[in-house]
Amino acid sequence: MTTLDDKILGLKTQNYVSSSESEGEDEDYKISGDEDPRDDNIDLSNVAAPPDFRLEVPKTGPKGVIQDYRRYKQLETEQRKEKEKEITALAQKFSVSCQSSLDDEKEKELLKELELDTDEFIQQYHLQRLLQLKEEQERRLQLNSPKFGKVISLENKDQFLDAVDKENPNVIVVVHLYSEDLRSCRAMNGCLQCLAQQYSLVKFCKIIARETGISRNFTKEGLPALLVYKGGQTIGNFVKLEDTFGQDFFASDVESFLIENDILTEELECQLTASVTAKKEDDNSDLDID
């Protein structure tokens, strides 16, 4: 059975001539003693010409070659398409995996931003809610807290103790120990009257020092004196204030002093304004509209 290569190159049995065969023929001539017909000295005039012959080569024909070529190109094309499919599939897989990875990263970033936004929103909401609760509490305190607006005169030691111990624990009580003979004490009483109107939620009181049973030495050396209480506890004790203010001074001087010592606050003053506004609104709401 022959192959395509054999058909193209030719078969050895038909047209292949080996150099060794030629050499064998030479030897045959020599052994038999016959003359070598290839010898140049031999007369070839009487030798008949050999019959004309051509090499016999299996014929495939142009159509067979073309079919083989087409089959080769078809296989080559199919292989190329398979490779392209594999490459395309790998590219798509890589693209999908990359896209999925990018989508995951974007999703994670969005979740982080959402968590941050949520945390900030919750914090802001809590802060706003705390402020609202504080305002509501202050409003309730304003409505429930007693309003004074003047300086309360205490006549004796018992009234002094009741004014301090029996008062609302949220109310600040300022008691002025004074002597009628001291000019600085009279100035202090006038200043406290002004402050009582400005800070109506603060309870301002006054009592003659000797009525409390305090020593004479303190009456001579320690006046005017301001004692401050809240919830029955002393939160301020300021004595011999003449050395601080002199004999003549104003309400603004005393106010600044009490603010610096954390007795009066802006919050108390705002509560006064808010309470007045709330009272006006309540009064207006009671009016009948025909």
Image (cartoon, rainbow, N blue to C red):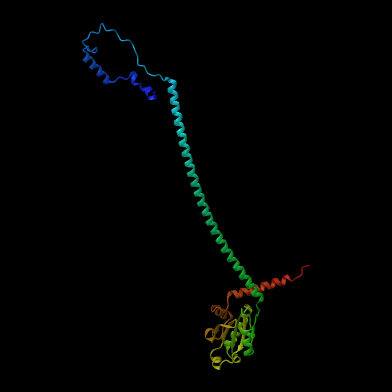
Q: Position of residue 77 (x, y in %)?
A: 46, 31
Depicted 226 relative to depicted 123: above or below: below
11 vs 97, left or right, is: left
Q: Where is residue 64 in the image (x, y as percent from the top left)?
A: 44, 22
9 vs 112, left or right, is: left
Give the tally of numbered discs.
0
- Residue located at (26% from left, 21% from top): 20
**In the displayed image of the protein, which residue is found farthest to the bottom?**
216
Q: In which quarter of the image is residue 172?
A: bottom right
- Residue located at (37% from left, 23% from top): 6
Residue 142 visible, this orientation: yes
Depicted 72 relative to depicted 279: above or below: above
Q: Which of 199 and 244 is in front in this view?
A: 199
Q: Nearer the viewer, residue 116 or 140?
A: 116
Where, quadrant-wise, is the N terminus in this rendering?
A: top left
- Residue located at (23% from left, 17% from top): 27
Q: Nearer the viewer, residue 60 or 92?
A: 60
Depicted 279 relative to depicted 83: above or below: below
Q: Position of residue 98 (x, y in %)?
A: 48, 47
Residue 191 visible, this orientation: no
**In the displayed image of the protein, which residue is found farthest to the right?**
290
**In the displayed image of the protein, which residue is found farthest to the front?**
32
45 vs 267, left or right, is: left
Where, quadrant-wise, is the C terminus in this rendering?
A: bottom right
- Residue located at (56% from left, 60% from top): 118
Q: Nearer the viewer, residue 13 or 131?
A: 13
Depicted 45 relative to depicted 250: above or below: above
31 vs 203, left or right, is: left
Q: In which quarter of the image is residue 137?
A: bottom right
Q: Where is residue 52 in the image (x, y as percent from the top left)?
A: 33, 11
